Image (cartoon, rainbow, N blue to C red):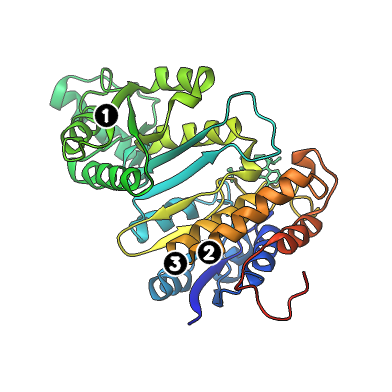
Amino acid sequence: MAHLVTLIPGDGIGPEVADATRRVLEVTGVEFRWDVQEAGAAVMDREGTPLPNRVLESIRHSRTALKGPITTPVGTGFRSVNVALRHELDLFASVRPSRTLPGVPTRHPPLDLVVVRENTEDLYAGIEFERGSEAAGRLRQELRRLGGYEVAEDAGVTVKPISVTGTRRIVTFAFDYALRNSRRRVTVGHKANIMKFSDGVFLRTAGAEATAYPDVEFEAVQVDELAMRLAWEPETLDVLLLPNLYGDILSDLCAGLVGGLGLAAGANLGWEYAVFEPVHGSAPDIAGRGVADPVAMVSSAAMMLRHLSERQAADAVEGAVAEVLIEGEHLTPDLGGAASTDEMSRALARAVRTERRAPGVPA
Ligand code: ATP
């Protein structure tokens, strides 16, 4: 039976890497019914919002989406589409694997780590008070009354809520993930010595929940020390469990450790819905030039195939990525080659080997 999947090409390089990904998926033999939904800058003028309700409705119906990057229009007052999607669909877990790929030079021994990032709380909760606004003034007064806190009159304020409930589900998710994927250790990054009541909740809840998983080692590290370890000896790390903001920063760092943003895949998961998307943004500097690296989006699609229980096809797509990288003949400029997105995606499609390959598709 065909899988119904919402496809959001996105903007910038999004449509280019989305087309490339469809080409690769088509030869796996897995059938899809794509519900293509435009979102982002392209629909702003027509529909007055970068994230029309029809996009959310489509995902609520299909339950699975493959998404390209979407730029948040600057200065329009719109919230980031990516953040809004995660909130609306309660996609509380972001999973970003960073594995050394064959043929891609890195500075470290082979790496295989995964960032599990809490996606809904923390400084990303969207609770903000604009500098000079009436609300910011009232907040200052209230803070003075509550605890004698003096916030500068010309300060903007962002609030950092971290709850036991929100942390518990991401901790459980991370440990279940570790068990399912034969991982040895979960390392929590925090700054609980400074942010006692937000990171403190994260750290203590993680420690308490970890006791239910005696087969997975639990380690807590201050996030600044974790950054140092990632630069110095990243091979000592396995699953990183992080609150929202640290997760955002360190997952880009991890992408850099294994060859850059053009290769890094990701998934946003909740109890009900799953949205698969590359870690990179819309890369306006190279958009429309046909040189974007399609691997991040293709690898995100491989994660989606696994989620849809299409393991064989997922293996075939990942195998194709490895083969094209090793062969080194059809690489985009970010990987030191001169191939276009189109040429690299054709090479990837040719390299997909599966018994279930669509009949009549030339090798
Ligand atoms: P955003 O704010 O949406 O994250 P950004 O421009 O700050 O966007 P990215 O779009 O993630 O950040 O990318 C940063 C740079 O990395 C890009 O400008 C581009 O040069 C490079 N890059 C990102 N993705 C790719 C890709 N798929 N192929 C090649 N280069 C890429």
Position of 20 with respect to 35 (left or right) is right
Residue kind at label 2, given as amino acid type = Gln
Q: 215 or 105, which is in the foreground?
A: 215
Residue at point 48% right, 76% down? 4
Q: Residues within 10 Å of mark 1 (few under 14, many from 20)?
A: many
- Vertical arrangement, residue 149 with respect to residue 183, above or below: above
From the top left corner, tell me how far across and down residue 64 is, in percent: 44, 67
Q: Which residue in the structure is indicated by mark 3?
A: 308
Residue at point 67% right, 71% down? 27
From the top left corner, tell me how far across and down residue 318 is, in percent: 60, 54
- Farthest residue, direction front: 355
From the top left corner, tell me how far across and down residue 241 is, in percent: 35, 36
Q: Is mark 2 within 8 Å of ligand 1?
A: no
Q: Which residue in the structure is indicated by mark 2?
A: 312
Q: Residues within 10 Å of mark 2 (few under 14, many from 20)?
A: some
- Nearest to the eye among marks 2 and 3: give it: 2
